[in-house]
Image (cartoon, rainbow, N blue to C red):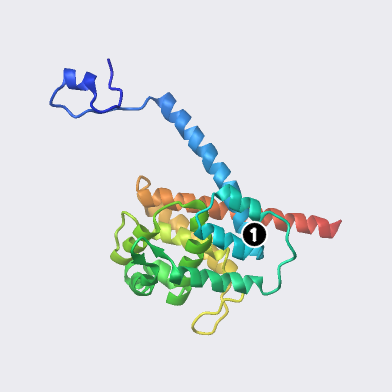
Amino acid sequence: MHCNGKFPCTPCHQSRPTAVCVYEVSARVAKNDLQRENGELRRQKALADQVLDALRSGHQVPMILQMLRAQQHLALIAKIATSASPEPSASSRSQIESAATGELLQLKVESRDCHSLEKTTALSESLYPEIAASCDEQLIKHLFSLFWTWIHPAYLLFSMEQFLEGYETDNQEHCSAFLIAAVCAAACDLLGPDWTSKSGKVTDVAALRRDFVAQAIRQEGLADRGARTSLDASRVMLIVNSRSKVSCLTRATGSSQDGG
């Protein structure tokens, strides 16, 4: 008889009364579970991409935000996001950017106010010098706000509260340079092209994104691959890479149509 993983485990208790019950899932069962999980993740990602595309274009933004706050099912939100509507106005991008910043400043995770970012970002230069060198405090706060407002609700990859606490306390269990670079790279896709730094200089968003991607790749080589933050960062980079492929495909399609 083998351990069945249920407590109390009679087989283990009879053979080794004082030993700790250890249950190991068979490789076949683990593989099947992983395949089901991957299939569900791909389905959720496809739905989340539809929602993100709608938000980036300014389509149904108030309705989508309301449904996200109400924690509606992602499939229902995606259905609303892909429904027909009038062409977005020219100011939709700026509306999305301002809404994203406002959402973070108002959002609370459990009892912890995310406005604590004002305190945590001041520590970034000593804890994560390479990240701090890429952008000023205002910009990194804005990138965080974009990620938490638009990407985090759709994918729910990790705990926002734990990430912010880890960023504040340099707790590598929940926050790392690899994860920060990945988050910022993903948020660059939502950063307005006319973003202006505190110095008054317009940010080259494409160059900033490339820099964060390069930092993420570099930090991945230095990080512990078995750490939870490395897994979380790798998932975020999957989003970054998928957006890059969509962007390249869109440009290629546009070029072929222009040529035709």
Q: Among all residues in the image, which is located at the extreme right?
A: 260
Q: Among all residues in the image, which is located at the extreme left?
A: 18
Quarter of the picture holding the C terminus: bottom right
2, above or below 101, in the image: above
x and y percentages locating residue 105 in the rendered image? 44, 72
x and y percentages locating residue 101 in the rendered image? 50, 72
Image point (56%, 50%), residue name: 74
* Quarter of the figure with residue 19: top left
Pointer 1 residue: 54
Could you tell me the amino acid type at mark 1? Ala
Image point (46%, 66%), residue name: 144
Could you classify mark 1 by the number of other residues whose Cα lies within 10 Å: few (under 14), some (14-19), or many (20 or more)? some
x and y percentages locating residue 141 in the rendered image? 44, 71
- Does the rendering let one see residue 192? no
238, above or below 64, in the image: above
Judge from the rendering whether residue 43 lies leftward or rightward of residue 121; answer left or right. right
* Quarter of the figure with residue 59: bottom right
Q: Among all residues in the image, which is located at the extreme top?
A: 1
